[in-house]
Every structure is written in C-alpha cells, then in structure tokens.
Amino acid sequence: MSNKILSGLIALSLLGALSCNRPTEVRTVVELDVFSGRPNPRWELDGAASQRLRQLQGDLTSGGPALEPAGLGYRGFVYGDGRGQVRAYRGYVTTPRGVLADPSHSIEQFLLNELPAEYAAIRETILAEIR
C-alpha cells in the first residue's frame, strides 16, 4: 500500500472517530394537551429551541401548588427530552423534581411560538387560554 493511500485511510478513520465523540444534540418532544377524542398536536424541538426551553425553565423559581388541568379543553404543554416529563400549565411548570412558578407564562408562550404551522388554526384559542 502506498504512503498516500495509507495516510488517507488514517485521516478518514480519525475523522470518523472524532465525529462519533460529538455530543448528541438533545431534542425535546412537545405535546399540546388540548384535544379529547383525537390525537393532540405533537412535535419535536430542534437543538437550539430545546436549549432555549431548558434555559427558560432554569430561570424559574420554586412555586406551587400547581393547578390540576381540567378534564376537557386546554390542559397545558407536556414536554420531555428523556429525563422526565414536564407540564407547563397556567403559569406553573411541574417537573419530576417539583413545581416552578412561571407568572409570565414564559414556557407556555415559548412553546406556543414553536407550534408547527399545521396547527395555526388553534393558536389564537390557546393564546387566549394562557393570558
């Protein structure tokens, strides 16, 4: 084997090893808990939006007790990234570790802004619920 070919193979294997060691981008799955009798809207946030959501949640302070969602209608946003399920509902964010106060509804507003275009027809209804 020539030195050029051998050098090329070594370089390719190093690049492959480096790409395998990159941190996995954390993505968040979101569900708008709103419908009864049909599937709720579900979508996935990209890495940047997932990071922004974690930042917003990290800025919140302890609060509680959270309101329990009603049986019908808007019941909040439920999201998770594999580390536990979180519910944002009427100014409270319920995590596996406790309840956080979100008086400005920052999490609900953010997730509503991330609602995919295919669900645009319900955007105003949800906005009225979280104000």
Image (cartoon, grey):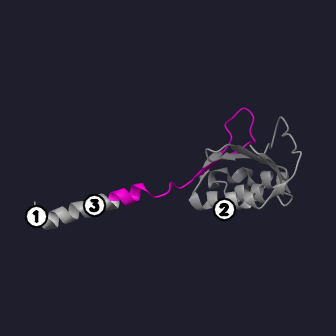
Determine whether, in the image, residue 84 is placed left or right of residue 107. Answer: left
The magenta segment:
16-41
* CA distance for labels 1 and 3: 16 Å
Q: Identify the mark at residue 2; answer none if there is no mark.
A: 1
Q: Mark number for residue 52? A: 2
Instruction: Give the farthest residue toward the left.
Output: 1
Amino acid identity at mark 3: Leu
- 5 versus 119 height, above or below: below
Evaluate if marks 2 and 1 touch, with contact meaning CB atoms under 8 Å apart. Answer: no
Residue 12: numbered disc: 3
> Which SS type dominates the magenta stretch?
loop
Nearest-to-viewer mark from 3 and 2: 3
Residue drawn at point x = 83 percent, y = 34 percent: 71
- Circle 2: residue type: Arg
Residue at the image position 87 percent from the left and 52 percent from the top: 63
Q: CA distance from mark 3 to mark 2?
A: 35 Å
Along the viewing direction, whichever of 32 and 120 lies nearer the viewer = 32
Is the C-beta separation of discs 3 and 2 under 8 Å?
Answer: no
User: Which residue occupies the foreground of this view, 105 or 17?
Assistant: 17
- Per the image, label 2 sits on a secondary structure element best described as helix
